Image (cartoon, grey):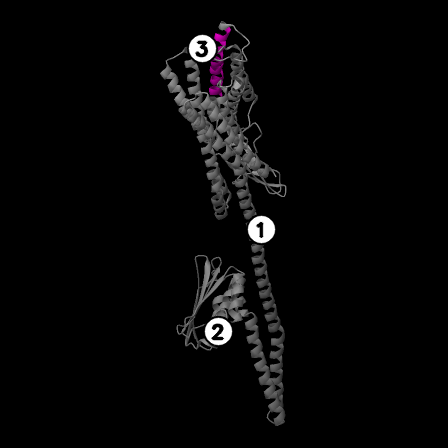
Amino acid sequence: MRGMSDRRARQVAIVAAVAVIVASVAYANAAGVSTGGIASMLLVAGSFLITGFLAWAQRPANRMGRLMVGLAFCLLLTAFAQPVWPIVVPFGLLSFSLANVLLGYLILAYPSGELRSNANRALIVLTFVLGGGPRFVRLLTQDPRAMGLGFDNPYLLFHDPAFAATMATLPYVLDIVLLMAFVGFVVARWVHASGPTRRTLSPVLIPTLVLLLILLGDAITIVIEVPANVREFFDNAQLLARTAIPIGFLLGILRTQIARSAIAALVVELGATPTPGKLRDALAHALVDPTLTVAYRAPGGATFIDAEGRPVNLPGEDSGRAVTMLERDGTPLAAIIHDPALLVDPGLVAAVASALRLAVENERLQVQVESQLDEVRASRARIVAAGDIERKRVERDLHDGAQQRLVSLTLALRLVRTKMGDDGDAGVRLSLEQASDEAKAALSELRELARGIHPQILTEAGLAAAIDSLADRAPVDVSVKVGPGRYSAAVEGAAYFAVSEALANVAKYAQANHVLVQAQWADGALSIEVSDDGVGGADPGSGSGLRGLSDRLAAIDGTIEVISPNGGGTRVMAHIPTVAPVLQPA
């Protein structure tokens, strides 16, 4: 609704501006104003009018645009101070006074559109009273007939020539006082401004200071009556300076637009480098405020800390610093401590705050995801460890239980066969021999099964001995090069089963004559490689063995790679991050 009303107000103002321009030009032309004078009036008023409408559209919440449009109207209506119709001269004088008031307001209120102190407000009131009042009084004392102008003043009340002479000069004397006051305010503001504030003020305050000095010089030349060419110089300089002020406003608007366009780049930069230090640097660059600080909400508390974890006290209202708070669901996340000049464009600060909020949220979510990922990794490692423990238990139970029973059964059968001797029943002897052979075969299979579940040699003697055992049982020729030392149970188990699975695949599919198994620790990791001279063409994704092995390795941050060109053999390479092996005494 607010946007619609502003748009309609601008449309009405544009129509009114066209009407005022036509009326003012027609009245000035009737008053005998030169073409150059009319052009100068249109140039100055038009500059404020165009810039005002642009500022109004870009920053509808900031009154600077509307003030500039109002100033342009007043500058145009000043033409009615010419006595074509003497009855409307007070209207022209009122427009002149309001134009001075609005120009002063723009100077003091730039760029926020709000007067910052009671002294500013008092100066604006004095501008209207001292700048306009004496001119209205002068109107009551001027006798155009006595001045040879050939028309009557309908507002003539005082016929005292001495008083009229005094009132003819007094407005310019008071103008000098007011202009010196404005110069003092502008200089003081510049001196006390911070770096970012000066960059914001410079496009307008510099031409404004030049205009004030020119107006001051012009008023002095009127009071002391200097030659006409000096007055002409000040008139021309005044025209240029008045035109430069709206251009300065336009530069400020363009600067804001450029700054807002940098927000997209800021979002990309924050997304690419979301560390606290990078956040501060990116924001300081985007807002052109090297003093900017980002304070983060301390975990579990109401205090704030900086990127290094040091406590940060948020500045108060009279500290000369501004604070923009970032919140999520009413809870503070962080605070941007910056120069108050940046609050001139709340939309810019809000956009930057949104970008920072997005970065902080992304960082928070990333921390949560990393935490969850760490928990998943830890959970997977616990599952693998629990599986290994269970494998060891099953292997131990088989070794201590079923294997021992089968050994005892084998010995009992041998004992019975021995006691029977050669004179016993031949059928019984044959049955005993077959039962003994079956018991031996079951024992052998059970031992092989136990080694597949978890080899006891791996637990007792370590990785090198366990891989040697695998090589001895392999149906192809296997060479083993394994470095000395013991690793953690998880690392040794993963490495052993990687070699076991690779040798099993060689036996099933490779048609190889020779296999080389290597395992060495270097640069913080155990590297295992199983290479054969077989037919190659192995597909890591076609079987469940390597996929399961990949999952097992991933549980301890390990990786596996298979290189198997057709006809070029197969290389299975595993990489397991781990500490250096513990060397055992010889």
CA gap, disc 3 to disc 1?
A: 89 Å
Residue 132 is covered by the magenta coloring: no
Would you call the spot at circle 2 few (<14 residues within 10 Å), some (14-19), or many (20 or more)?
some
Q: Residue at x 51, y 30 (%)?
A: 19
Marks 1 and 2, the one that precedes in the sequence? 1
Q: Is residue 402 above or below residue 167?
A: below
Question: Extreme front residue here?
Answer: 150
Q: Residue at x 36, y 16 (%)?
A: 229
**In the rendered view of the protein, which quadrant contains the N terminus?**
top right
Three-letter code for the amino acid on which mark 3 is drawn = Gly
Q: Residue at x 59, y 71 (%)?
A: 395
Mark 1 or 2: the one toward you: 1
Marks 3 and 2, the one that precedes in the sequence? 3
Camera-side residue of 361 and 29: 29
Residue 181 is covered by the magenta coloring: yes
Camera-side residue of 579 and 5: 5
Stretch of the chain drawn in magenta: 163-185
Q: What residue sits right under mark 1 in the picture? A: 368
Would you call the spot at circle 3 few (<14 residues within 10 Å), some (14-19), or many (20 or more)?
few
Q: What residue sits right under mark 2 in the picture? A: 505
CA gap, disc 3 to disc 2?
A: 121 Å
Three-letter code for the amino acid on which mark 2 is drawn = Asn
Marks 3 and 1, the one that precedes in the sequence? 3
